[in-house]
Amino acid sequence: MIPKPPRVLIFLGVLAGLAAIVPPAVIARVRATPDENRAVHMFFDMDFQPKFKTQAVNPLFADGRAQRYAVAGTVARGETDLDTHLHQGVVNGAWAESLPAGLEMTDAFLARGQQRFNIYCSVCHGYAGFGDGTVNKRAMELMANAEGPVYGTSWVQAKSLHDPVVREHQLGMLYNVVTNGIRNMAGYGAQIDLEDRWAIAAYVKALQLSQNASLQDVPTELRDNLKKGNLQNGEVK
């Protein structure tokens, strides 16, 4: 038969168990209770660095302001954007009519523009650019069947890229529209790389030309074949 431990040991064991519960309870209570006093920091790091908070007074400067204006002409590293042709689509204050230096109007360049156009633009403007993309169609249907704004918003018919006004847009202006948007259309400067935006603009011009071409737009060496009606299955024989 196992002898019972002395009552003193039992009493001390209970006290030890209760004492062991106290630290976790205190820690839990402290963590759950807001305290205006600063927390205990074993390592200060940069928590208590000398500084002036927003809108604070700084007697060092004559105007007493802690916040300082940026030095005139300051530009972030890598963001000078001095080439207005490349970054803004502007040459000598007018919209550029050609691609910036370093970009060439090749089949691969136009194919890239078509790919990017189909991904980002066709949903509203349609694959052929007539403003009949699936998103636009759905939005127009919702607006037509509703008495007011749908879900608190409204929709404006997507522009046809073959509209006479849009056909007059220069290459640089089309690039700028893709980058910064226009009217109700948001810009895609944050989503699409710079060269791809130029590729899209170039493809839009090609798309417009495909629907509004004249005989004068056909290369000279192919005109005679066209005049003779020698065009079969899309190929000049």
Image (spheres, grey):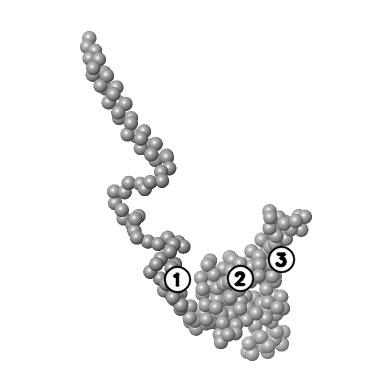
Q: Residue at x 22, y 9 (%)?
A: 1
Numbered label attached to residue 157: 3
Residue 118 visible somewhere in the drawing: no
In the rendered view, tell whether residue 58 sits above or below residue 33: below
In the rendered view, tell whether residue 8 sits above or below residue 132: above
Find the distance from the CA under tag 1 to the CA under tag 2: 40 Å
Q: Residue at x 39, y 67 (%)?
A: 59
Residue 83, x across and y down, in percent: 49, 81
Residue type at mark 1: give it: Asp
In the rendered view, tell whether residue 133 sits above or below residue 103: above
Q: Nearer the viewer, residue 211 or 69?
A: 69
User: Residue 35 lies in what quarter of the image?
Assistant: top left
Q: Nearer the viewer, mark 3 or mark 2?
A: 2
Find the distance from the CA under tag 1 to the CA under tag 3: 52 Å
Q: Which residue is mark 2?
A: 181
User: Residue 98 lies in what quarter of the image?
Assistant: bottom right
Residue 148, x across and y down, in percent: 75, 56
Q: Residue at x 61, y 76 (%)?
A: 174
Q: Nearer the viewer, mark 1 or mark 2?
A: 1
- Dot 2 falls on a residue whose secondary structure is strand
Q: Are marks 1 and 2 in contact (CB under 8 Å)?
A: no
- Dot 1 falls on a residue whose secondary structure is loop
Residue type at mark 3: give it: Gln
Q: Nearer the viewer, mark 1 or mark 3?
A: 1
Residue type at mark 2: give it: Gly
Numbered label attached to residue 63: 1
Residue 6 visible somewhere in the drawing: yes
Q: Nearer the viewer, residue 109 or 230?
A: 109
- Quarter of the picture holding the C terminus: bottom right
Label 3 neighbourhood size at 10 Å, few (<14), some (14-19), many (20+)? some
Find the distance from the CA under tag 3 to the CA under tag 2: 15 Å
